[in-house]
Image (cartoon, helix red, strand yellow):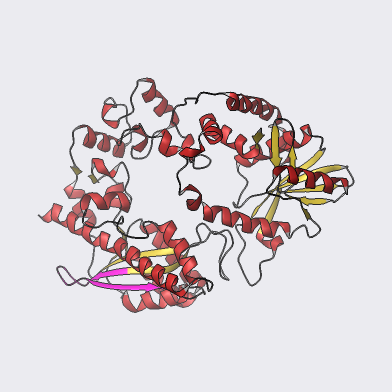
Amino acid sequence: MLTKSDFIKYLQCYKYLWLYKNRKDLIPADYADRFAQIFGEGYKVEDYAYKLFPDGADAYDEDFKTAISKTQDLINKKIQVIFQPTISGRELFSRADIIKFDTKNKCWDIYEIKGSTSVKDIYEADLAFQKVCLETNGLKLGKLFIIHVNKEFVKKGEIKPEKFLTIVEITQEVNDLVKETRTQIKEALMVLQKTKEPQIRILKQCYDPYECCFTNYCWKDVPTNSIYNLAGRLSEQKLEQLLDEGIMAIKDIPEGFLKSHRAILQHQAIKHNTVHIEKDKIAQELAHLKYPLYFLDYETYGFGAAVPLFDGYHPYENMPFQYSLHVLPKSKAKLEHYKFLSAKFADPAPDLAESLRKIIKSKGSVLAWNAGFEMGCNDQMGQRYPKYKKFFASVNLRMFDLMQIFRQGYYVHKDFAGSASLKKVLPVLAPKLSYEKLNIHEGGTASESWRKMIDPATDKTESKRIYNDLLKYCELDTLAMVEILKVLEKVIFG
């Protein structure tokens, strides 16, 4: 039996499909938890989409046989809108989101619900499979639609589904795929019949279009400094060339093969076990810094939230709820630390902006890691709350992106693994500081933890624990920049 989700896995990687059917024991225990927010947001979008069809009847049931029976019963009763209809035959199984009967043309239209803000190619393949499955099992189909989130939507009071969502017809695009899809379905069914695990080269498929849950298993023999970790990443064609030569380790890449400046520097650092440092370039960058130095980091909510939490926000728009700010008034002065963390179930931006404005003065450089992110948040807060627009504009004019020293290749270490992220640079340059000792290790967890913390239903003791964990996590981000700057200054000045 091949389901729609099975088919999508096959299109991504036939080994993915086989492992999912035969080796679910290899899926990491925390995999479902890591994607709980994505699934949760999807369910919220579905709920709003169903409201577009107030006369719809639900055919869902956890038991597949019951769901199939309920679907057929609703069709027999001539119910014109059915939610979660389940259709299955001897080989194919599909559960659609919504089908609606077209009384004029005597056929069913399919509406597939997606939490994204646009139509993606994979959605066409998704609907092509549904079309084949439903038509094979006797349903006459008409038009095919994607319902997705309207990126221009701004929350203002109660959310109206017709404004929050957009409906796009892709009937022709899907029909153009049907012949190819029938062939791919036959190939996928053949994969399911295999008793031996298939082999496939690792190229770009592990995270495209979705993150595979078997990467830990498939990558177990990939060396630490592999060709997949080159700065800037190699194209599929380049990866194929190296794999054809039996090359998987960066150190074995032949001279002259790489063209990217950063990749060449990384290759040399690994091959010769050296650290590449361009003191003059680093000195030129740091010469732009003016005291007092403000080391700023935001934690935000919204990047993974299709449904805005508060009025004035778009779907998936970042909303800063916390900052950590280390301040160095002058060289060798005592380091100061300031913090803000909203604990209210309300838009945190006004209080955050007011707090920050009291600390960051009109002079001095504001340092951030990947500063474009903080600058974007500042622009959005200034636009949303005009009284702070001038303040945030001043901050953005004085922003200094410490990450660029590493992204530009002025400092390259083999253990950065081709990355300029703080999580890669910090353990090398300031190993005494570690995220591993914290209960919150990265921004996604911080975001969801904050959402749980401000939820009135969350136990007060749990909220307090999360509050303290968030403070420790965000503080480490700015302290990390302080320590990395010290290392860079030591490199230059000794």
| In the displayed structure image, the side of residue 146 where residue 396 appears, left or right | left
- Check if residue 419 falls in the magenta segment: no
The residue located at (50%, 58%) in the rendering is 303
The residue located at (62%, 62%) in the rendering is 153
Q: Quadrant of the N terminus?
A: top right
Specify whether residue 287 is in view.
Answer: no
In the picture, residue 296 is in which quadrant?
bottom left
Farthest residue to the right: give it: 104
Residues 273 and 393: in front is: 273
- The magenta segment is 325-343
Residue 142: horizontal and vertical position, in percent? 80, 41
Residue 286: horizontal and vertical position, in percent? 22, 57
The residue located at (31%, 33%) in the rendering is 223
In the picture, residue 190 is in which quadrant?
top right
- Check if residue 340 falls in the magenta segment: yes
Residues 397 and 484: in front is: 484
Residue 450: horizontal and vertical position, in percent? 45, 66
